[in-house]
Amino acid sequence: QFYISRKIGDFQLEILDEFPESSQQVQTMVTLDANGVALKDEANKPVLNWVFENVDSKTKITVKQNSLSIISTEFKSYDSGPENKFKDVVSQVVSKFRKHIPIKNFTRLGLRYIDRCPLDELTNEYFGKFYMPVIDINKYRLEDLIDTLIQIRMKKPPHYLHFQSGIK
């Protein structure tokens, strides 16, 4: 906890040109009883978060004691288009972060709302390094696939939700 607090200023200086807006936020979890009354819980201590934003590119970085989040509403895809790819933003931010706050062990990496995540190799072994497959890739080897689409449609009143994923 204290290590990040000591190093976050170095990270901020490195990203200052790309993310000029910065703030510190204190986050406190609250436990409510059945009547909505806050319960006193010693485990719910305030947590300091650092937020860096680029309003023009609609991109925000949030650093917590146990996570680094990069959120953008500017990009429509991870790796498409001739320039200004979200892939490049993620790569630059993570590289600069690790330069000042070296993470030895990643327990989770998540990409949400990404249109396309290209693979350098279409093999089971390579795919398994980055993704948890929805299909049995030992039975249906990626090397043999021509096309796949996994689609889930569900009704959650008052909305209809549609999730889809595919490998081409």
Image: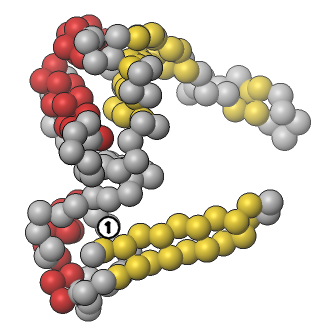
Q: Amino acid at mark 1?
A: Met
Q: Residue at x 55, y 21 (%)?
A: 27
Residue 64, located in which quarter of the rendered image? top left
Q: Residue at x 70, y 66 (%)?
A: 160
For the question of whether residue 62 can be seen, the reply is no
- Residue 72 position, x and y percent, is 42, 35
Q: Is residue 111 above or below residue 104?
A: below
For the question of whether residue 5 can be seen, the reply is yes
Residue 51, located in which quarter of the rendered image? top left
The quarter of the rendered structure image containing the N terminus is top left
Q: Is 153 left, or right, of 108 in this rendering?
A: right
- Residue 142 position, x and y percent, is 21, 82
In-front residue for pair 107/95: 95
Q: Which residue is mark 1?
A: 132
- Residue 63 position, x and y percent, is 37, 24
In-front residue for pair 49/77: 77
